């Protein structure tokens, strides 16, 4: 399913394409949140439930598809990461779109729950 908020992939997760071009889903968003909190790659990966190698891959993929890097290395230690301004705005946009999508789904469910919506009797 594709829509104004994002795409739902086969696994059932909502992926949002943000302004900078990166595609962000729940794991990537949580990874960005952990980096914003100053977590190391290892701590961020553990909190998301992925390996350090996979977390590094996700970061490289987001940076590679974005017109501006969302995450950058700090110093010479690749374990030290910093969320860039583009990363902060991408995460905010992701959260806003996911919240708008959740609200739209709630409104759909509320409408389906109304008995007069499907009443065929006259």
Image (spheres, rainbow, N blue to C red):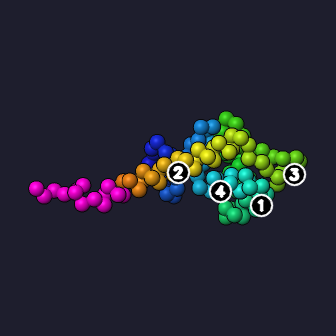
SS for tag 2? Answer: helix
Marks 2 & 1, CB-CB < 8 Å contact = no
Pointer 2 or 1: first along the chain: 1
**Which residue is label 1 attached to?**
42
Q: Alpha-carbon distance for marks 2 and 1?
A: 26 Å
Q: Alpha-carbon distance for marks 1 and 4?
A: 13 Å
Q: How many residues crowd around disc 2 within 10 Å: few (fewer than 14), some, or many (20 or more)?
A: some
Q: Quadrant of residue 68?
A: top right
Tag of residue 30: 4
Marks 1 & 3, CB-CB < 8 Å contact = no
Foreground residue among 24 and 90: 90
Pointer 4 or 3: first along the chain: 4
Q: Is residue 80 left or right of residue 59?
A: right
Q: Pinpoint residue 100: horizontal percent, then vertical percent.
A: 48, 49
Q: Pinpoint residue 14: horizontal percent, then vertical percent.
A: 52, 52
Q: Alpha-carbon distance for marks 4 and 3?
A: 22 Å
**Where does the magenta region start and end?**
109-122
């Amino acid at each position: 399913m594709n829509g104004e908020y994002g795409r739902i992939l086969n696994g059932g997760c909502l992926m949002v394409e943000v302004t900078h071009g990166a595609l962000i889903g729940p794991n990537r968003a949580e990874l960005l949140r952990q980096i914003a909190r100053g977590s190391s790659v290892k701590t961020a990966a553990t909190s998301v439930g992925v390996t350090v190698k996979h977390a590094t891959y996700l970061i490289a993929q987001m940076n590679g598809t974005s017109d501006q890097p969302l995450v950058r290395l700090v110093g010479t230690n690749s374990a030290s990461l910093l969320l860039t301004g583009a990363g902060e705005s991408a995460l905010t946009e992701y959260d806003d779109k996911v919240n708008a999508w959740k609200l739209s789904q709630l409104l759909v469910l509320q409408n389906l729950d109304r008995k007069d919506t499907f009443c065929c009797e006259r």
